[in-house]
Image (spheres, rainbow, N blue to C red):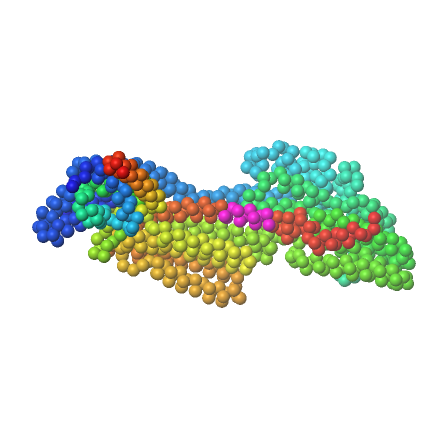
Amino acid sequence: MNGRFASLAGRLTHRLRMDPDLRRDVAEELQSHLEASAAEHVEAGEPPERADELASRALGDERSLAEQLWRANRGRIRLRFWLRWTARVTLVPAAVFAVLLVPVSHWWQSSQSRSLQDLMHWQVLHLQVEAEPTRPAAPQPGELEAHPLLRGLDDAERRLLFGDPYAASAAESARAMVQAHPDDPAVYAHYALTTLRSLPGNWDTDPSPADALLPLVERGREIDPGNGLYDLIAARLPVHRGAQLDFRDASDPELLVRDHHEMEQAARLFAQAGEKRITTRTAQLVRRQLALLPPARSPEEYLLRQSAFAASAGTSLMPHLAHTRSTARHLAAYAMLLHEQGESERALQLLDTVERVGVRLGRDAEMRTTMLVAVAIQLQAMRHQVEILEAIGQGEQAAQRQAMHDELGARMQRFREDQPGISPSLMSLALTYQPALQEAHLIERVELAWMHRISLVAGLVMLGGLTLVAAVVGWVDLLRHREGSARPRLIWPRLRHVVPAAAAVVALLAGVYVVNLFGHGTNAAAALALVVAGLVVGLWPVFIATSLRRTMVDQGLPVAPGSPFWIGLVIAGATVLVLTLGLLMLAASSTEALAGLGVAALVLLALAGAGVARMWVMNRHWPAYRRNMVRSALPLLAGSLVVAGVLGGAASLYQERQAVSMVDRRAAVGFLHEMAHPAASEIRAWFGQQGP
Amino acid sequence: MDFSSELVRGSVVPIVLSLLCDKPMYGYEMVKVVNARTNGLFEWREGTLYPTLHRLEAEGLIKSHWQAAETGKRRKYYAITRRGRGEFKRRQQEWQQFAGAMNMILMGS
């Protein structure tokens, strides 16, 4: 307290010393009163000393006034004390919590995802890709059982999920799954397919697989008698023994028949399969496996589940489909050979058998790859039927078959055009190991949610850093100037100064969200999100400083010349202009550069914000202004962090869940839903109309 | 004529609210206005005004803000709140009833 009435004001407010800010406020008010009163006495002709004495006397009895001031303010002092104490205890920890919440939750989610990813990669690489030289080591004993995602599962459930994790091969692991679920047709089909895949690749030179396959097929028929899958597997053996396709002319491979009896046996088995439903039950098993894992909490987890199980299922399924396609190709070629040998009726009958297997396979196809194989079998059988029918003079029937062939071909073409160029079953496999392919994937909403989360984390960390600096500087100032006029003041900006700025920031964020909903590609979304995070982090402290400065001006407190608002606005405007031009230039040439531009913008804006802070807040020529600004900005920055952390975090979580629910059950993402695609349903319906 | 100190003390709150209904004022300005309007009949002890102002502010009937005057001096202005206006109306009615009753008793009207 300064001035000639400082001593009197100090005595009158001595009992308010528990609250230094309030005491100074009251003392300044009394001094202002006394100075005005004394000035009036001086104007009336009194000498200054006498004027001061009269002014002091007019105030009343000193002791009584001090008591009255204490009584009038003690309630406020208590309230302010508790509010300050509560703010100290809660606001800063809440701000720290808000800053840490999103990155920590991000880290936690990532670690959970990584944990899941480790499991899935191990499952895929260790068991499925046995020849892979860099395959990961098997988990340590007890590691899987203790895994957080598997802790609640019993042994049978863990077996269903991973078989025997310590087995030396995929087939052994699948056998362990069967031992835990002995009469389960889906589990057994998985075992059969895995065993089929694990057999030596070259059946011509390696030992015959018959010893391994036949018992497998017999047991499969017992467990799942209505499934033609095992007849198809069995048919591969006589085809292997009976004939070989010579692909030296790839467009017209020549069939070299070694044993007609074997080919007839294969035809019989194929016919048996065609009488039954044909399913690998892969989707059924994967659904049960997915249901054992806790629900996905983030897009990463969701996609990881989808891709890993698709990869696992795909690697089991593909050899079977390849064998089936090969057997059908051999039998179709065998039919043409019979036709050339004059047995056209028998040839047509055999092609009917092949066609029927194609129909059965397509009717119950669980995923796109199966559908592709079914259509390929069907189209080939039809082409050969047309050829034979024309050759034996049945032009009308040939024309009918040709029309059906063309219709199926057209439906297939539509399906190909509507879907990504690569089957989602395989896309998911690719996604697991080649994240760059995500750019081409139809999951922009998920990517957008990721970008927003990253921007939020970046923004909070930057704002948190600024708050930390303000806290340290503010506390040092308070320690150095505990009492007196140099003590930093806590100033609350007028609501009318803060609300428009807050509304502008919220509108900016909402605008970006809406713009991104229309989708402009991942990199553009990333650039935009980062630019806005930078703008918000750069501008918000400027808005706070501006509103505090305007309040200080209103109160006649010392302020540095100039306004940070216009400088902030000019920097932000120039940045936006540069970025817009940059975006326009880069949009046509390099999409990857957009993301880099966003990061550069963030750095640029951070530098701009630091420059403004350095220029206006840390101004050494205006120490009182700096002290007041830093102390007053701290609760506002901390409060902003809490609001941004809580609201932004909640919005981010909501957006991610929305994104997951949007992509869930979409054929383009999960192989389990590939057949839900309208074009796929159309083909399946076509298969449904064919024959019994 | 000097009013009793109890009467003066009891009138401070309605007078302050009444003054602030017109415009925001600082403490010394209020003292001067009251003295001028009452031709010095209300000789407020200036100091008693501030505890009253602080109490009214704590009760939410008035609010304050610092503002620099044209001379550059900072002054603490007080303005009435919506709640303060309601309280003022209530006190006005109360005073009218009280004054009417007193008139009937003292003046026999």
**Count of numbered marks:** 0
Q: Is residue A240 above or below residue A19?
A: below
Q: Which quarter of the picture shows residue A120?
A: top right
The answer to whether residue A175 is above or below residue A463 is above
| Residue A664 in view here | yes
Q: Is residue A657 magenta?
A: yes
Q: Which of A168/A624 is in front?
A: A624
Magenta span: chief secondary structure: helix
Q: Reply yes or no: does residue B75 show up in magenta.
A: no
Residue drawn at (11%, 52%) of the image: A44
Instruction: Provide the residue span drawn in magenta.
Output: A651-662
Residue A295 lies in quadrant: top right
Q: Position of residue A155 (x, y in %)?
A: 63, 33
Q: Position of residue A422 (x, y in %)?
A: 65, 56
Q: Can residue A322 be seen from the camera position used here?
A: no
Say which of A513 and B81 sits in front.
B81
Which quadrant of the rendered structure holds the N terminus of chain A?
Answer: top left
Q: Which residue is pictured at 88% across the width and 62% down the height? A: A396
Left or right for A575, reference A71: right
Spot occupied by residue A668 in the image (x, y as percentages of width and height): 64, 53
Name which residue lies at 42% across and 42% down: A97
User: Is B68 left or right of B85, judged from the image as shown?
Assistant: left
Image location of residue A570, percent across then percent down: 37, 62
Q: Residue at x 39, y 52 (%)?
A: A499
Looking at the image, which residue sits at the far top? A154
Task: Judge by depth and name the residue closer to the eye, A377 or B27.
Answer: B27
